[in-house]
Image (cartoon, rainbow, N blue to C red):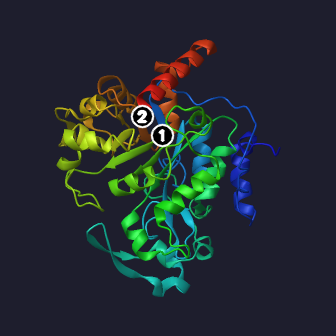
């Protein structure tokens, strides 16, 4: 068995990625008998949003490695498709904001305007480039106020390479991939076998052993949440896999890209009852749960309570440490924000750009049980409950 790459010092991995021309990660083995420290299930999940992208450019192997090093329970990614049908990890359907595409003269004539989620968007689109071409691009930090030293050092990675990062970790690390903009992808990318984007997405997960209901034995070995803003995609993949799914919810002004429903429709009790047949949780933007005015929190809505009443978890997004993103109520203290959302609002997971901060906060407030037997018992109880509710 080859050694886990997570045992290699992080800075050495960065150096290797810069100087070696081959893919950063060999594809993972489909099977492994290695015993690893299990994922924690006794406190809200620490979800590394696009990796530790507060430090390192988003959706890169280095950002995911850093998140694992910092204690993330799950590494989160967005899945899109290239012109030739390869599944890649990238957030935007355009390459403009987080790659060096604008300086690549050979691609100057690829700029296009397409309709994306009810609006015309102009830029260099992922769907107009082959995987080989995308691999020549270099990724950069999205925000100018974050560390720029890693700009140009890392490339776009594939879905399989992302899976490799998780499976090669020295402990059990979950993955949290999003079926990103499926309406747009299915319109612009076609596969020879006639399958849809969602089918290819699930095929990749099944290829590497990701299967099983939430808290099942298989799930605990390879934890996974499938997420999407498109409810019809979640319904479709429910016919392909029993892995747990999360319905993402955008701002109150944004309609669903596939079913053209309003925020108010998809957060109604009737709709929560319907979607709970297909998903185990919601992933709302946090400012829709607790509205904000002049950077101060207003009265919280009852969305978390109503979701829990429908046996749905709530994993809000996105928690960022910088003052630009912290509401005045938290006095420029991200720990105060974590505390409010976990202990006052009672959410079940946090999407964060700073997985290390969430981990340190949780280790201070709710450290791992010292009694491993007690922790195992908690897992067994959760499994029994999940099995009962599945009938």
Q: Which residue is mark 1?
A: 47
Task: Tell me residue 188's x, y (percent).
Answer: 43, 76
Q: Is residue 69 above or below residue 238?
A: above
Q: Quadrant of the N terminus?
A: top right
Is residue 90 visible in the rendered structure shown here? no
Tag 1 secondary structure: strand
Q: Residue at x 41, y 40 (%)?
A: 321
Judged left or right of residue 24, residue 314 is: left
User: Which residue extends farthest right?
Assistant: 1
Q: Going by the picture, which residue comes out furthest to the front?
A: 391
The residue lying at 47 percent from left, 33 percent from top is 45
* Residue that mark 2 sits on: 349
Q: Is residue 91 above or below residue 4?
A: below
Q: Nearer the viewer, residue 289 or 273?
A: 273
Viewer-proximal residue among 190 and 80: 190
Image coordinates of residue 58 in percent, x first then y, are 51, 55
Answer with left or right where residue 191 lies relative to residue 259. Answer: right
Write the residue at 55% across / 20% down: 380
């Amino acid at each position: 068995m080859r050694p886990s790459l997570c045992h290699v010092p992080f800075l050495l991995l960065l150096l290797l990625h810069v100087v070696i021309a081959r893919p950063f990660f060999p594809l993972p083995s489909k099977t492994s008998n290695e015993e690893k420290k299990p994922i924690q299930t006794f406190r809200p999940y620490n979800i590394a949003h696009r990796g530790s992208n507060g430090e390192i450019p988003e959706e890169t192997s280095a950002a995911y490695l850093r998140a694992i090093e910092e204690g993330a329970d799950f590494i989160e990614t967005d899945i899109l498709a290239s012109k030739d049908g390869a599944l890649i990890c990238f957030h935007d359907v355009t390459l403009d904001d987080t790659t060096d595409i604008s300086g690549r003269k050979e691609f100057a004539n690829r700029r296009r305007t397409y309709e994306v989620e009810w609006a015309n968007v102009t830029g260099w689109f992922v769907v107009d480039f082959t995987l080989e071409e995308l691999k020549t691009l270099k990724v950069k930090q999205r925000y100018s106020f974050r560390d720029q030293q890693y700009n140009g050092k890392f490339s776009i990675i594939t879905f399989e390479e992302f899976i490799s990062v998780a499976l090669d970790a020295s402990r059990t690390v979950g993955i949290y991939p999003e079926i990103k903009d499926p309406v747009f992808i299915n319109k612009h990318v076609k596969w020879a076998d006639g399958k849809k984007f969602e089918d290819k997405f699930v095929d990749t997960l099944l290829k590497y052993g990701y299967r099983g209901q939430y808290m099942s034995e298989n799930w605990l070995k390879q934890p996974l949440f499938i997420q999407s803003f498109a409810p019809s995609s979640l319904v479709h993949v429910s016919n392909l896999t029993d892995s747990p799914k999360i319905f993402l919810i955008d701002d109150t002004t944004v309609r669903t890209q596939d079913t053209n429903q309003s925020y108010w429709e998809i957060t109604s009790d009737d709709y929560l009852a319907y979607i709970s047949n297909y998903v185990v949780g919601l992933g709302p933007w946090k400012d829709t749960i607790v509205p904000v005015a002049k950077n101060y929190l207003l009265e919280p809505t009852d969305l978390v309570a109503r979701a829990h009443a429908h046996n749905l978890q709530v994993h809000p997004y996105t928690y960022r440490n910088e003052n630009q993103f912290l509401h005045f109520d938290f006095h420029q203290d991200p720990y105060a924000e974590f505390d409010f959302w976990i202990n006052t609002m009672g959410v079940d997971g946090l999407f964060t750009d700073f997985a290390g901060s969430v981990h340190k906060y949780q280790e201070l407030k709710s450290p791992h049980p010292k009694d491993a037997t007690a922790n195992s018992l908690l897992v067994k109880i959760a499994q029994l409950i999940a099995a009962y509710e599945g009938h």
